[in-house]
């Protein structure tokens, strides 16, 4: 590349410099996307939406941090985590299939059709709340993805294996900050303590299996989240001990007639999030982007 | 050891390095004015990257496809990375990142005026890539040959990423132009708003640019503002044609004699207004940056306090 001729540098044909490749219409191209034997296609779709929506909605909350981070290194790190989760969401929503694409799922479903856990959608809050949510979410998701890597569905298995590497970093980033904040100043300690107290009522929901998750676990495709609790508790206990913080002792938040995020019943924050996420796409339903 | 040489020898050595197109490196002796000029230039450039995250960051959560969202988030992240390299380059000249940030949020150092314009539709994301990044590349490509080594090397990486961003922006506009009539109108309307501010990015006309002469002599800058502006116009006109938009300048036409496009008079009074802090978004951009910086102070303090405790327990 010549640095004396800007025009030449710009028009140079070198697709390897495209971060996502140039032909990114189908992120699953080249993979065998047949539904595994003995699995109901609608169940598989719903399960992909559950895990995909978790990633999409947490990524949205991380995107809200852009230009607001306490230091440039964290600006880069938070965007990086948001990008990783957005990438996972894209693959999972594409895998959901059912005749719809990733954008159709992200921009043209209504709130009750989103299946993310409520933890994902809680408002952004301050840096203490960012770290508290990320620590909980990444610890849970890493436990989940590392088991899902053994899924009988080759697509889910591959997506999970890729995700494990990413979420390992997310958990590490959150754990390191939890320790710095917990063992930093009086003020930072209070901020992370408050953050943990706010997210904790939504922790129980992460481990309650939905009937679809149970059916797919039976078929060797999904992971029963109730089996993740011990690993989660163990990791959180280690991190909070290093941070000289206690595990919060607060009651779990009830659902509506027992229904929570996985059933499409969300908090009031979700409507505003979707209004923003979907605004341009819905204003131009025939648009091409 | 350079420290034992008399100043006039050091100065002669510096001038010879510049003359022979060799690079000045951090430990080399440089005249104080060279150091100050470079710190000012690099800091303004770093600030521009950081403030420049805001107008585009404005559309990340609303991007209308997941692919465009990923591209935009990655781009804004790149800008934070550029800010980091540039602050680091400034630090090799003895500046301090925290002090430079302080100057930015207190209005004592400037950033590129272009970022004081609002982003009003998603088409702005594409037009910023095409025109604003395009203008930035024209300005920055020659800086890859800047006499100061760390700046030149940072610019090589930055220019590679900027040209990638420009291409992504242009590709978004191409896609939108193939879409609906409303999308095509959005692209034209965004082009109309960004064209003149993009031309202003090259700075005042040569006759009115106080720093250019010395910076050229030191080979910090390689071309004058007007030369670069002309280059940008010449390269943008065929791109606008290929896109199917018109540029909002009735005087824009090919001049066969000069071998360049002629173009209309820039509204320098608007440029001066924006430079003076009265642009559409100056107040918001600086206030936003200050709020993020001040709001993050407790986090930085916590990290420092924790690090001090660790150091104490090891000692």
Image (cartoon, rainbow, N blue to C red):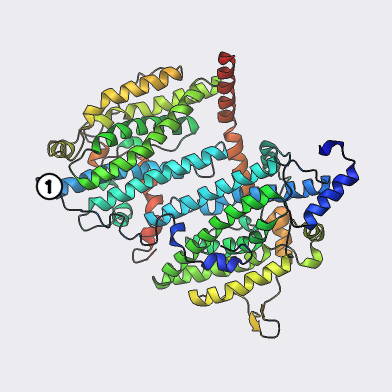
Q: Is residue B14 left or right of residue A33?
A: right
Q: How many other residues sit within 10 Å of disc 1, few (<14), some (14-19) or many (≥20)?
A: some
Q: Position of residue B235 (x, y in %)?
A: 59, 72
> How far across and how far down the image is residue B240, in percent?
53, 74
Q: Which residue is mark 1?
A: A40
Residue B275: x %, y % from top left = 72, 56
Q: Is residue B40 left or right of residue A273?
A: right
> Foreground residue, B254 or A254?
B254
Question: Which residue lies at the image location 78% right of the left edge and 46% below the top edge?
Answer: B36
Q: Which chain's residue wears label 1?
A: A
Quick one: A274 or B245, which is closer to the camera? Answer: B245
Can you see residue A173?
Answer: yes
Q: Residue furthest left?
A: A38
**Residue at 56% across, 64% down:** A9
Residue B64 falls in image quadrant: bottom left
The residue at the point 12 percent across, 45 percent down is A39
């Amino acid at each position: 590349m010549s640095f004396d001729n800007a025009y030449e540098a710009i028009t140079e044909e070198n697709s390897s410099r495209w971060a996502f490749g140039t032909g990114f219409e189908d992120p699953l191209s080249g993979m065998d996307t047949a539904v595994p034997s003995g699995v109901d296609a609608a169940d598989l779709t719903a399960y992909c939406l559950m895990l995909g929506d978790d990633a999409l909605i947490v990524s949205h909350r991380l995107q809200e941090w852009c230009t607001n981070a306490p230091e440039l290194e964290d600006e880069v790190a938070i965007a990086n985590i948001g990008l990783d989760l957005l990438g996972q969401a894209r693959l999972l929503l594409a895998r959901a299939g059912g005749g719809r694409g990733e954008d159709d799922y992200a921009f043209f479903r209504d709130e009750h059709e989103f299946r993310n856990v409520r933890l994902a959608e809680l408002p952004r809050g301050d840096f203490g709340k960012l770290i508290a949510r990320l620590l909980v979410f990444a610890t849970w998701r890493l436990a989940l993805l590392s088991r899902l890597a053994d899924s009988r569905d080759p697509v889910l298995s591959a997506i999970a294996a890729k995700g494990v590497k990413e979420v390992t970093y997310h958990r590490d980033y959150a754990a390191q900050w939890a320790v710095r904040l917990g063992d930093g100043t009086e003020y930072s300690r209070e901020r992370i303590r408050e953050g943990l107290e706010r997210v904790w009522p939504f922790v129980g929901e992460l481990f309650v299996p939905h009937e679809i998750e149970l059916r797919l676990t039976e078929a060797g495709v999904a992971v029963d989240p109730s089996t993740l609790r011990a690993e989660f508790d163990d990791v959180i206990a280690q991190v909070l001990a290093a941070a000289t913080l206690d595990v919060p002792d607060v009651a779990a938040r009830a659902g509506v007639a027992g229904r929570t995020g996985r059933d499409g019943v969300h908090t009031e924050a979700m409507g505003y999030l979707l209004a923003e996420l979907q605004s341009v796409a819905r204003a131009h339903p025939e648009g091409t982007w | 050891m350079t420290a034992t040489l008399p100043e006039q020898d050091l100065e002669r050595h510096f001038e010879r390095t510049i003359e022979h197109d060799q690079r000045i490196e951090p430990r080399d002796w440089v005249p104080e004015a060279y150091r100050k000029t470079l710190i000012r230039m690099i800091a303004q450039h770093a600030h521009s990257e950081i403030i420049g995250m805001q107008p585009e960051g404005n559309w990340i959560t609303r991007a209308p496809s997941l692919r465009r969202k990923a591209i935009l988030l990655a781009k804004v992240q790149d800008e934070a990375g550029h800010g980091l390299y540039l602050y680091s380059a400034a630090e090799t000249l003895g500046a301090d990142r925290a002090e430079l940030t302080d100057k930015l949020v207190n209005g004592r150092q400037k950033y590129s005026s272009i970022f004081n314009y609002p982003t009003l539709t998603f088409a702005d994301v594409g037009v910023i890539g095409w025109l604003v990044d395009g203008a930035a590349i024209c300005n920055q490509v020659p800086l890859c040959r800047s006499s100061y080594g760390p700046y030149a090397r940072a610019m090589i990486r930055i220019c590679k990423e900027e040209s990638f961003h420009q291409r992504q922006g242009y590709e978004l506009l191409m896609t939108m132009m193939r879409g609906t009539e409303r999308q095509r109108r959005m692209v034209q309307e965004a082009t109309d708003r960004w064209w003149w501010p993009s031309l202003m990015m090259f700075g005042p006309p040569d006759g009115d640019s106080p720093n250019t002469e010395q910076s050229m002599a030191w080979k910090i800058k390689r071309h004058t503002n007007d030369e670069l502006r002309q280059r940008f116009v010449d390269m943008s006109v065929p791109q606008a044609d290929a896109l199917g938009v018109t540029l909002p300048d009735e005087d824009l036409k090919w001049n066969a004699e000069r071998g360049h496009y002629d173009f209309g008079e820039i509204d320098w009074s608007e440029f001066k207004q924006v430079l003076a802090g009265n642009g559409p978004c100056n107040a918001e951009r600086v206030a936003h940056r200050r709020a993020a910086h001040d709001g993050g102070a407790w986090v930085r303090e916590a990290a420092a306090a924790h690090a001090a405790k660790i150091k104490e327990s090891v000692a």
